[in-house]
Image (cartoon, rainbow, N blue to C red):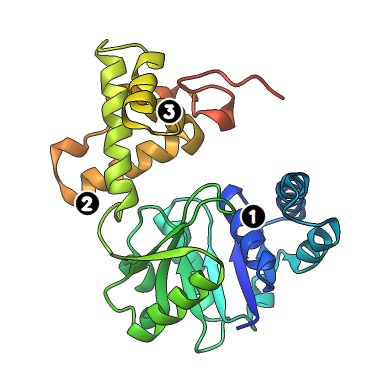
């Protein structure tokens, strides 16, 4: 496989495109309009600039990486790729609609992968006629830096598909970890309840925002406190994943904290909105 497609040029999508292009793959980045493509290209350029400043990437190599990433707004142009990694919004209906469309465009042996952080791979695969070639590739943020990729098997994902995707993941210099298709997989099934409990601690007055984050940073050696991490992820994303866990597993321990719901309702979504548990002045 020499060419891949990434659908969605947001934070995760542009990072995934950058990583594949950095390893020599030709990347086709699909977005809904040219404005979003321009923002994705700018984000990739800025990310590569930081690597150049660190001295681990030359300026000519930066240009070569960017040259390997082509943008398009037409799904039909993905007809020749061997792998598509979907990285659109966390909405099951939108993802299933996209998978059904791509299923009719891609070559018969192409693999459809989702970067979803919580939505069932089996459910997405059911929207296609290639359920054996549908799989989860859950990259971590920031994609160029983080080593882990959760490889999630759907009910019908074949051993061949899993082996191919694991091999491609390792070619990216990432560590592939096999995970079965359960709500939240492993990463978010463990991480999100911790964040949710931190929000409960804040709501109940157990400690201040700064104290809660300090306990986890200094006492548990976490690089970022749970409330600051929630702001980085996006409080709306955290709430959505908690709802998936609560609905999918039916256990009250996954009940989203009312304060988390209130923050999202107020539009305090974290870094992307300029305010969450912390304030983020416009740069």
Q: CA distance from mark 1 to mark 2?
A: 30 Å
Residue at label 3?
A: 264
Q: CA distance from mark 1 to mark 3?
A: 25 Å
Tag 1 and tag 3, C-beta contact below 8 Å: no
Q: Could you tell me residue 53's position as x and y percent?
A: 77, 44
Callout 1 environment at 10 Å: few (<14), some (14 to 19), or many (20+)? many
Q: How many marks?
A: 3
Q: Could you tell me residue 13's position as x and y percent?
A: 59, 56
In the rendered image, is residue 125 in sight? yes
Q: Earlier in the sequence, mark 1 or mark 2?
A: 1
Tag 2 and tag 3, C-beta contact below 8 Å: no
Q: Could you tell me residue 17's position as x and y percent?
A: 64, 62
Instruction: Tell me the number on the disc at residue 14.
Output: 1
Left-right relation of 262 to 255? right
Instruction: Tell me the number on the disc at residue 248.
Output: 2
Q: CA distance from mark 2 to mark 3?
A: 21 Å
């Amino acid at each position: 496989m020499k060419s891949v497609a990434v659908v969605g040029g947001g934070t995760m999508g542009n990072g995934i495109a950058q990583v594949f292009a950095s390893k020599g793959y030709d990347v086709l980045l699909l977005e809904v309009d040219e404005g979003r493509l321009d923002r994705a290209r700018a984000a990739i350029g800025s990310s590569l600039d930081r690597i150049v400043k660190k001295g681990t990437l030359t300026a000519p190599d930066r240009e070569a990486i960017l040259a390997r990433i082509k943008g398009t707004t037409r799904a039909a142009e993905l007809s020749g790729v061997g792998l598509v990694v979907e990285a659109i919004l966390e909405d099951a209906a939108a993802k299933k609609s996209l998978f059904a469309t791509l299923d009719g465009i891609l070559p018969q042996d192409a693999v459809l992968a989702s970067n979803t952080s919580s939505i069932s791979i089996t459910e997405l695969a059911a929207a296609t006629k290639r359920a054996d070639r549908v799989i989860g590739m859950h990259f971590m943020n920031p994609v160029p830096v983080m080593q882990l990729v959760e490889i999630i098997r759907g009910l019908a994902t074949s051993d061949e598909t899993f082996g191919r995707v694991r091999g491609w993941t390792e070619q990216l210099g990432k560590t592939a970890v096999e995970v079965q298709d359960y709500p939240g997989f492993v990463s978010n099934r463990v991480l999100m309840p911790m964040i949710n409990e931190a929000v409960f601690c804040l709501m109940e007055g157990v400690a201040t925002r700064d104290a809660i984050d300090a306990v986890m940073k200094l006492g548990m050696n976490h690089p970022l406190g749970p409330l600051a991490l929630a702001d980085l992820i996006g409080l709306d994303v955290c709430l959505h994943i908690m709802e998936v866990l609560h609905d999918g597993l039916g256990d009250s321990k996954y009940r989203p904290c009312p304060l988390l719901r209130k923050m999202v309702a107020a539009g305090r979504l974290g870094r992307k909105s300029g305010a969450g548990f912390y304030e983020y002045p416009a740069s």
